[in-house]
């Protein structure tokens, strides 16, 4: 990626202020859609849909892997299923408060970094 001459290092890492505003507005629009989905279909249906989409994503990942990562259609199907899974996982943050997920996420990332450091030390 080539940085715009007026971009700071933070713009390159985080995105320009314009990009961040655009992204924040998109996240808010997504959130409103998720609220409407929960209102329309109900929380239990959204929980079940999350499990379904994660299973589909899992199967798509394996199909792509079994194609030795050569199949463009398998890759596209995987991307579509990952998008479904991400959308449902984002909705789960409205069911299980996001800070609870973030707590475990931080712990697991710390553990991953420790394992990477252990590997680097071998
Ligand atoms: Mg799907």
Image (tube, grey):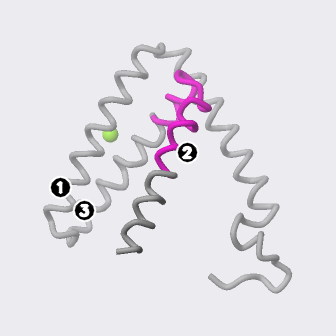
Precedes in sequence: disc 1 or disc 3: 1
Mark 3, other Cα within 10 Å: few <14 / some 14–19 / many ≥20: few
Residue 107 higher or lower than 99, as above or below: below
Q: Is mark 3 within 8 Å of ligand 1?
A: no
The reply to whether the C-beta atoms of the residues labelled 1 and 2 are less than 8 Å apart is no
Q: Residue at x 17, y 55 (%)?
A: 63
Find residue 34 and report its horizontal and vertical position in percent. Answer: 57, 28
Determine the secondary structure under disc 1. helix
In the drawing, what numbered circle is on residue 106? 2
Where is residue 98, by image quadrant? top right
Q: Could you say where residue 5 lies in the image, as x and y percent from the top left?
A: 82, 86
Mark 1 nearby-residue class (10 Å; few <14, some 14–19, many ≥20): some
Instruction: Pick out the residue farthest to the right.
Output: 6
Mark 2 element type: helix
Res 58 quadrant in image: top left
Quadrant (top left, top right, bottom left, bottom right) of the C terminus = bottom left
Instruction: Give left or right: position of 56 versus 1.
Output: left
Between the residue at mark 3 and the residue at mark 2, the CA separation in whole angstroms equals 34 Å
Residue picked out by circle 3: 73
Image quadrant, ligand 1: top left
Can you tell which of label 1 and label 3 is closer to the viewer?
1
Q: Please give the residue where the numbered disc 1 appears in the rendered image.
A: 63
Query: Which quadrant is the N terminus positioned in?
Result: bottom right
Magenta span: chief secondary structure:
helix
First in residue order: circle 3 vs circle 2: 3
Q: Which residues are magenta?
A: 89-109
Sequence-wise, the earlier of marks 1 and 2 is 1
Q: Nearer the viewer, mark 1 or mark 2?
A: 2
């Amino acid at each position: 990626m080539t940085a715009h001459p007026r971009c700071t290092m933070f713009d390159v890492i985080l995105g320009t202020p314009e990009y961040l505003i655009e992204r924040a507005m998109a996240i808010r629009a997504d959130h409103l859609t998720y609220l409407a989905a929960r209102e329309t279909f109900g929380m239990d249906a959204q929980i079940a849909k999350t499990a379904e989409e994660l299973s589909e994503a899992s199967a798509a990942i394996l199909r792509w892997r079994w194609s030795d990562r050569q199949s463009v259609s398998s890759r596209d199907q995987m991307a579509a299923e990952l998008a479904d899974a991400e959308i449902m996982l984002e909705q789960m943050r409205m069911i299980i408060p996001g800070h609870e997920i973030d707590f475990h996420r931080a712990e697991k990332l710390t553990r991953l970094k420790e394992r990477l450091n252990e590997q680097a030390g071998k």
